[in-house]
Structure formats: C-alpha cells, structure tokens
Amino acid sequence: MTAAVLGLSLLTASAQADGGISPQMMTKIKSFYAGTPTDRALRNAIVGTDISRLAVNADNRVAVDTHFSHSVPGRGITNQKSSGRCWLFTGLNVLRAKAIAKYDMGDFQFSQTYVFFWDQLEKSNLFLQGVIDTRKRPMDDKMVEWLFKNPLSDGGQYTGIADLLTKYGVVPLDVMPETNSSENTRVMSSLISLKLREYGLKLREMSAAKSTTPEALQEAKTEMLGTIYRILALNLGEPPTQFVWTRRDANGNPAETKEYTPHSFYDQYVADDLQRNYVMLMNDPTREYYKLYEIDFDRHTYDGSNWTYVNLPVDDIKQMAIASIKDSTMMYFSCDVGKCFDRTRGLLDTDNYDYESLLGTAFGMDKRQRVATFASGSSHAMTLMAVDLDADGRPRKWKVENSWGSGPNDGHLIMTDKWFDEYMFRLVINRKYLTDKAAAVLSQKPVLLPAWDPMFADEQ
C-alpha cells in the first residue's frame, strides 16, 4: 500500500470514527429510555398492537358531523379496485355528474376501461418516443435514467383526462366494462413495463448504427406499439369504434336510443373544452406563489400538454373552491390522503391521532418542511363536492366523493379545514371561478421543472 493510499485510508477511518456511534455516545443514547413502569407499559402495549390504534385521540372521538351548508348532489360511489386510476375515476366522476344532471339520468358511468386502454398505449408511445429523442445521450444521463425508471404507470393527473378524452372520446361503462386487469393493474402494467424497457434498449441499439434512419426508428416503434396494443386488447378488450346505446331516465325508462362513435358520445355527454376551460391550481409552499409552473415530460400523450399549474396560497384556492361548490360544480382534487386518516369514520383530521403523547416526542415540521424532505406529497385524487361554512363564511370542513367503493359516510371522506390546509395539493377549476389575481398568473411564461422533481414523482 502506497503512502498516499494509506493516508487516505486512515483519514476515512478517522472520519468514520468521529461520525459513528461510540461506546460513550451509546451510553448517552440509552439514557433516553429509562425503562420506567410507564415505559414498560407502553412497550407492552405497542409490541402487540397497531400503533395508530393506541394513538387514537379519545378527545376527538365525537360523532362526525355530516351536515354541509353547501353541497353538490352525489351521483353514486365508484370503485377503482386494486389500481392507481384515481385520477381517471375522479375526472370521469366530475363529468358524469354534469351528464346525469343535464339528462336526468339514474345510475350512469363513463367507461374507465376505455380511457385506460388509450392511456396505457399513449404512455407507451411517450416512453418509446422519449427514448428515440434522447438516443444520443449516455445511459447515465438524468433524463434517460428517468425514462427507463418510469416507462409506464397507471397513475396520472388532470392533463390525462383533458388530452385523452379530447383525442379518443368516451363511451358508457356498459359498452366497455371493467375487466380483471383493469381492476387489478399490477401484473399487466409490470409486463408491459418490462417489454417497454426491452424495446427501449433495442431502439438505442438501432440508433447506434449509422445506417439507421429516423424513418426506420419510427417504423420499429410502430411495430413495438402493435405488440403493446395486442397485450392491452387481450387484457382490457378492444375499444369500440361505434356502438348503439340507450339512455334511460332517473326511473329507468328508455329515453333515447342512438348510434354513436366515442367522439360523438363525447360531444353530446361531455360537451366541454377540457383543455382550455380548466386550470390546475397548486398549493406548494416550497415554491413562490402567484407563479406559473410546468413539469417537463409530465403528460399522458406525446402530442399532449405538460402539466401546468398556478401556485397559490391555500386560502386563495379555498375561495375559488367555495365559488364552484356554490354553483353546483364538482372539482378534481388531490391530496396526501394517508395522513391523519381514520378509515373507520372516513375522517381526515389532524387531531385524529396523538402519537406525541404515546411516544413522548413532538413531530414539528410544517407543510413546507414536509414537502421539502419528501415526507408529504399528493398521493390520491378525489372529487371535491361539499363545504360547510360558518356564519362568517369561513370553511369548517369539506367533503369528497371517493372511488374506493362503499364505506363510512356512504363512501365519501370528510376532512376538517385544518387538514385541508396541511395536506391538500391540487384543485382543477373552471376558468370562470378564477379570481382576477389567479387569472393574471396565466399570462406568465411558466417556470419549467424537470420530470424527476421530487414533488411530482409519485403524483396521482
């Protein structure tokens, strides 16, 4: 061993010794657990019980107040089953509420499977074209690495609703119903992801040959997508191009029978410009408010729109949400649903659990700090449909229509206003409800954020 290497080795060992847990440090660490009768009682309880059950705040166990001063009528609870399609159910649930109200229908749903088929095909193309676009970069390039880490997912956000429905239209649920693979997406999505990674390597190998033309790469990509299409058709069924459907009124009586295409059905039962009439609002306290942001390559279709949003204080977002609810309009909403969630009562409340008293330590980070340290982020989309206002017009609590099937509150979740402050992240609102100050932000050139930004890596 050379003197230089020996010196470096000794320096590393010294640094490890200085930063490691020494016997003296261990003695001090152990002193924080005194092993008192209280400590032993807590340990006996915790080792055999779910910690959240022990941390239930008994002072907060009063009956949930289910009254809301302003509410949009619910249209029945849907169930995404074992899939990450909450974004899809939420978007379609907002649209079906309008369709049911307009045509006085009873039970009605748009087909989630139909849109999901095109979503998975379009995301496959997004990945393969991304590989072609970055073919001259090394494999350890940040964008190339991100592509191969994220070839496909069943998650998404509002731009998927806007771009996919505009491009492919919609159909009723009974024209293309759910299948086992649409309700349980893990195996199908993992197999397609595996195939896409294989195809991505093949495209990079082809592009390394000087004789390969751009046209040859596109032809190869088309053949690859043909295989993906076949896998999807086998798992989900092939999307219809035309169909006959009978609309029924609220009493189940036939009202109209027509032949449709997915686009003509969209024109009649959605009849809205989803790409231009809606704006995504965000509450991200780690970034400057009243700014427009865009997430690079965060979209569902290659020829679609990147996710673009207006970052606002939460009170500004509440003001517009209240205006929408008062006008009987539901909204696409997303949040960090797993935090402070009492599933037995369907209640999201920061006072549900008292971990601090149980464990003898405070958990003191605020929302900005939690986001910055990856402790919190949007994980689930639902349909915001109700608010309870006090005498001064301030919100006390909110209600969302969930897509987890039946449960407490008839499948709805209730959230306190304090929980809303801490764990809501996104709201999609019709432009007509924007305040002047929020609307003015749309004229800005958006700040471009990378696809791998941690705030958006696992968005739903």
Image (cartoon, grey):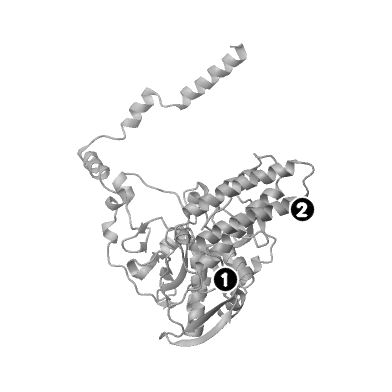
* Quarter of the image where the N terminus is located: top right
The dot on residue 17 is none
Kindly identify the amino acid type of the residue bearing the numbered disc 2: Glu
Image location (x, y in percent) of residue 332: 51, 68
Image location (x, y in percent) of residue 451: 61, 51
Residue named by callout 2: 215
132 w.r.t. 330: above or below: above
Mark 2, Cα crowd under 10 Å, few <14 / some 14-19 / many 20+, is: few
Q: Quadrant of residue 207?
A: top right
- In the drawing, does residue 291 fall left or right of residue 43? right
Kindly identify the amino acid type of the residue bearing the numbered disc 1: Pro
Of marks 2 and 1, which one's residue comes earlier in the chain?
2
Mark 1, Cα crowd under 10 Å, few <14 / some 14-19 / many 20+, is: few
Given residues 139 and 283, the one toward you in this image is 139
Say what secondary structure mark 1 lies in.
Answer: loop
- In the drawing, does residue 144 fall left or right of residue 351? right
